[in-house]
Image (tube, helix red, strand yellow):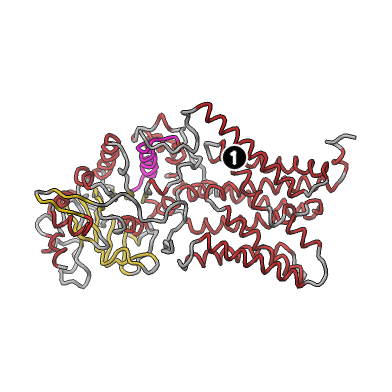
Amino acid sequence: MTADQSTQSAVGGVVARPAPGHPGPPGQTSAPDGLLGEAMSSTRMEAVGEPCPAVSLVGVRAGYGDRVALDDVNLEIPLGALVAVVGPNGGGKSTLLKLIAGMLKPWEGSIEVLGAPAGREARRVAYVPQAELVDWSFPVSVWTVAMMGRYPRLGPLHQPGRADRDAVAVALERVGMTDRAKSPIGALSGGQRRRAFLARALAAEVDLYLLDEPVTGVDVPTQEAIMELLGGEAEKGKAVVATTHDLGAATRHFRSVVAINHRIVASGPSDILTRPDVLAETYGGHLLLLGEGLGILDDSHHHDDPAGRERHYHEDGGGR
Amino acid sequence: MNYITDPLGFAFFWQAMAASAIVGLVCATVGSFIVLRGLAFMGDALSHSAFPGVVIAYIIGAPFYLGASIAAVGTALAIGWVTRQGKVRSDTAIGVMFAGMFALGIFLFSLIPNYVGELFGFLFGDVLGIGFMDLVSLAILAALVIGTVALLWKELLFATFDPLGAAASGLPVARLDYLLLALIALTIVISLQSVGIILVVAMLVTPAATAQLISKSFGRLMVIAGAIGAISPIVGLYLSFWFNSASGATVVLVQSAVFLLVLFATILNSSYRRPARSVAATTTAD
């Protein structure tokens, strides 16, 4: 426990909190406690001064079937944060997003999102799934994908109107996909596909973005464009939480990181990912440290979710 | 003798044509979701599992659609429950449950002492035996299914395309899934009399599969599927009248032929136009 506490700091808007029941001052969500160190002040300056955090997990333990995916997670993400979630395959990155989105119920602990239990404020949340989990042969155009961001607020009895079309047009413009609006998604490149889904999230006009691997397998210019947009949303006081395999992208593009490997190993400003102790503890045996800040990470890209069109919302079955 | 107008002289032919066109339309509408969600096997399972319900309804003298609905919906829920236990994959659960239910139907059927042609009709379909009142209730149920799909079009589309994104943004995805299963079960019940348990899956899947080959949008897919679903039974019934062949099977053969024609056409087309963008293209390079 002491080992990982030593790596916990709080800069860039993310606070990994000590476990409940751990000695600490009451009201730790608002008052900086000793554990979090001096960096605390800069944290709060960066975050917009909202009374409630965007995301707050306390003592969360969760998994699939009888397999524990995440344990002892205490995490607070304020509005205005731009956070990368990093960790090894199967380390619980996607699980963390699903918990925050309310798609997976924790076994223990509580999760508050935008001031309400997870899932309650869903219309203020946009979720972009991993590219591997989308059926790209689905007959649907870029325009319709972006319009889907408007469906939840419309409700079953209403058809998209002027305001919705305007919001979609603006979103497509912002991601630079206006001229591909009518294209079927199957005809797009990998980067264009990510941008189409980002347009859906923007069109939804939400306060919290949850993105699963938004820059994986995307060319560098698109990566820059996507991150610039997300950075801009964070500046506006929205919270952005994205998983990534790419430690370089996490360090370059995100202000803060949460490193997880079935529990929170470290959290703080994104440059903590240059620390060998943080990397070693996050990636364990998958990392070969060469010294002088060099290391080899054996973490080939694959996802730990059930493949194909297997539909699972609150559990993953585990019987694969 | 006129091949087109002669059959129209029979009231049963009119009714059969109306009934199977309605059934084809409903099957294609619901089938669009089945194809895009990869639920073809589930559709086949639900139709087969309706059989014990039909047999029990016959034995106790209840309406067949009541028995069929209860058996189909019960099996759908049971498959969901077995899958959630996480011990077997969902397709395994479907295979086990539907074979078991169909066997139960045959078992009960074999206990009935005398031959019951009516029950055979449910296995293979007997569209020519559909009476006027059957046609009316069929039309009402069909309107119910299509009306529900029209009302929840956006939500069903989002939940089908990206269930995770839809659930995260507040759509009741689990409830929409159950609703869709209920619509599939109801569609199967509507279709049992005319197409039969064994061939319903073709009516559900084939028109939508054909439409998927040539559609770039979901709306167009549904319209094309609906058109194939509604027109092919009319062609099929004429063929069955001329050849004196089984009506359900003939209709299904027409749909299969249309599918193969369209498939070959798209293959030819894409080999002429290569490198062309096709709907199913999975390019990842920029």
Chain of the residue displaying label 1: B
Q: Is residue A235 visible?
A: yes
Q: Quadrant of residue A15?
A: bottom left
Q: Nearer the viewer, residue A167 or B207?
A: B207
For this view, does B245 lie left or right of residue B222?
right
> Does the stretch in magenta take in A240?
no
For residue A133, above or below residue A221 = below
What amino acid type should be assigned to the residue bearing mark 1?
Ala
Q: Position of residue A162 (x, y in %)?
A: 46, 36
Q: Nearer the viewer, residue A209 or A121?
A: A209
For this view, does A217 lie left or right of residue A26?
right
> Does the stretch in magenta take in A194?
yes
The residue at the point 73 percent across, 67 percent down is B55
Q: Nearer the viewer, residue A256 or A297?
A: A297
Range of magenta residues: A187-206
For this view, does A151 lie left or right of residue B74?
left
Q: Position of residue A309 (x, y in %)?
A: 47, 52
For this view, does B279 lie left or right of residue B118?
left
For residue A242, above or below residue B280 = below
Query: Which residue, given by chain and number where applicable, does mark 1 sit on?
Result: B211
